[in-house]
Image (cartoon, rainbow, N blue to C red):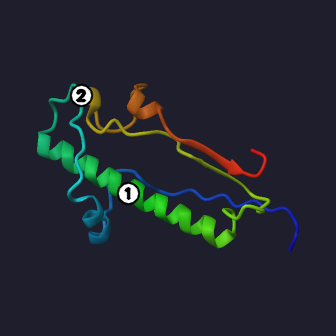
């Protein structure tokens, strides 16, 4: 109590194979996602499905992080907590004829880095 502490969490997703529950699938079912640029390796339907699954995993991860922040009190105005959320890579999701992360293009490299806390 009252002593500094650190909590490091590493979430396994979103990574293929995307594991989507029915509830996650329902939340994104009717959303529109743009087609990938320069993609001739997957049909429009396959691209859309991969993008929906990826979005569902991201939304679920966002919800889980939000619950964690609520439980720890990190969102209270007087909280003495610094929260850092970051990703190691993105997914190409069909861009430039590629699914995955092994190319140094924007879809793989442009990832979030969020820092939140009093005085940050």
Question: Where is residue 110 drawn, in percent x and y?
Answer: 47, 33
Neighbours of disc 1 within 10 Å: few (<14), some (14-19), many (20+): many
Res 102 seen here: no
From this view, report whether residue 1 is shown above or below residue 27.
below
The residue to which callout 1 is attached is: 57
Q: CA distance from mark 1 to mark 2?
A: 22 Å
- Secondary structure state at the residue bearing disc 1: helix
The residue that appears at 29% across and 37% down in the rendered structure is: 99
Circles 1 and 2, Cβ within 8 Å, touching? The answer is no
Task: Write down the quadrant of residue 2 in the picture.
Answer: bottom right
Question: Where is residue 115 drawn, in percent x and y?
Answer: 65, 46
Front in this rendered view, residue 27 or 13:
27
The residue that appears at 78% across and 62% down in the rendered structure is: 78
From this view, report whether residue 113 is shown above or below residue 8.
above
The residue that appears at 47% across and 63% down in the rendered structure is: 63
User: The C terminus lies in which quarter of the figure?
Assistant: top right
100 displayed left or right of 66: left
Neighbours of disc 2 within 10 Å: few (<14), some (14-19), many (20+): few
Question: Where is residue 20 drawn, in percent x and y?
Answer: 31, 63
Task: Write down the quadrant of residue 71 in the picture.
Answer: bottom right
From this view, report whether residue 23 is shown above or below residue 120.
below
110 displayed left or right of 96: right
The residue that appears at 39% across and 27% down in the rendered structure is: 103
The residue to which callout 2 is attached is: 37
61 displayed left or right of 25: right
Front in this rendered view, residue 93 or 84:
84
- Secondary structure state at the residue bearing disc 2: loop
Which of the two labelled residues, at mark 1 and mark 2, occupies the earlier sequence position? 2
69 displayed left or right of 79: left
């Amino acid at each position: 109590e009252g002593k500094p502490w650190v909590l490091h969490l590493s979430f396994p997703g979103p990574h293929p194979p995307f594991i989507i529950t029915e509830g996650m699938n329902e939340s994104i079912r009717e959303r529109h996602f743009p087609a990938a640029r320069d993609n001739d390796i997957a049909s429009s339907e396959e691209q859309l499905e991969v993008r929906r699954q990826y979005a569902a995993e991201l939304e679920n991860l966002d919800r889980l992080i939000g619950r964690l922040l609520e439980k720890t009190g990190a969102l209270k105005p007087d909280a003495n907590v610094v929260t850092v959320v970051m990703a190691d890579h993105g997914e190409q999701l069909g861009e430039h004829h590629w699914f995955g992360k092994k190319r140094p293009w924007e879809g793989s490299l442009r990832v979030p880095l969020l820092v939140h806390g009093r005085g940050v």
